[in-house]
Image (spheres, helix red, strand yellow):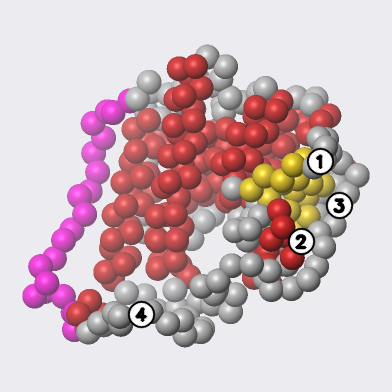
Amino acid sequence: MLCWLKISGIAPQFRPAQTLLPLERSMTSSYVPPRVWKWEPKNDNQFASINRPTAGPRTEKTLPVGQNPLQLYSLATPNGQKITILLEELLALGISGAEYDAWLIDIGAGDQFSSGFVEINPNSKIPALVDHSVQPPLAIFESGAILLYLAEKFGVFLPKDIAARTHCLSWLFWQVGSAPMLGGGFGHFYHYAAEKYQYPIDRFTMEAKRQLDVLDRQLACNEYIAGRDYTIADMAIWPWYGGVVSNQVYGAAEFLEASGYQNLLRWQQQIAERPTVKRGRLVNRKEGGIKERHSAADFQGLV
């Protein structure tokens, strides 16, 4: 059930063009797009060295394969954490078929452009999963697709009732459609961009706060995102939006006035306390966790 309650907020402030600062006026009016865009390599953010307007492999390298049924190639970004959280939840239920090897894909070093990775994900984004319990092995890419595949394969964390299932999937795909505005929009201009400009930060901050308000209203009368039950919708949304309001993503909690989203904060803390979530967040970290995960023993001394 949707829960649109009246929740007070701060309306975005707009300024007429004549009140813009000189730098803002220049950045909004001086650039004239050419008839045909040409790529010019730049060094204006930490990912600039790997960003190109073309797809396909750049290096020849096969992917490692472990002994477990599921092989995950990922990194502990919010999208990567979705999958490791679900896998740890499945294992906690005693589902042995969810045993997995997790291999670190260093996106800063360009591992996602190796021939082996591109073969299982032509889009060169983490995470990617290969299920070796079926023949031929099945590759799945896109975090939302992986969540749905695993939930359907093992029959948990996705309601069986058609109405509840549809509601859960609506929120799953809400996350898939909304997060690029939060990450590629707000996160890029507020956190990653070498130079900070007010116009894009204002634009994407307004949208980020709107999304936080959507979630806060939904959680005002629901324990979890899709209702009474913990589902893949929670696992998809929590690493991104729980990370933002808890100041673990982009360091922007104060800037976004996250303390005002009390329902969202309650939900964030509730999920953060799950042992499975604590383990899932540690997987495929370059620092402060485990680079690779092959068995439960890898967490010894960490949680």
- Amino acid type at mark 1: Pro
Q: Which residue is mark 3?
A: 65
Q: Earlier in the sequence, mark 1 or mark 4?
A: 4
| Distance from Cα at disc 2 to Cα at disc 3 | 11 Å
Going from the N terminus, do you reach mark 1 or mark 2 first? 2
Q: Amino acid at mark 3?
A: Val
Residue linked to disc 4: 36
Q: Amino acid at mark 4?
A: Val
> Viewer-proximal residue, 182 or 59?
59
* Viewer can see residue 161: yes
Mark 4 vs mark 3, CA separation in Å = 43 Å
Task: Say whether disc 1 or disc 3 marks the residue closer to the N-terminus.
Answer: 3
- Circle 3 SS class: loop
Whole-percent x, y for residue 115 in the image:
74, 65
Looking at the image, residue 24 sits to the left or right of residue 54; the answer is left
Residue drawn at point x = 75 percent, y = 48 percent: 72
Write the start and end of the magenta stretch as one range: 3-25
Q: Is residue 216 above or below residue 17?
A: above
Name which quarter of the figure residue 88 lies in. top right
Q: CA distance from mark 4 to mark 2?
A: 33 Å
Whether residue 225 is in magenta: the answer is no
Is tag 4's residue or tag 2's residue first in the polypeptide sequence? Answer: 4
Query: Where, by quadrant of the figure, is residue 126 drawn?
Result: bottom right
The amino acid type found where label 2 is placed reads Gly
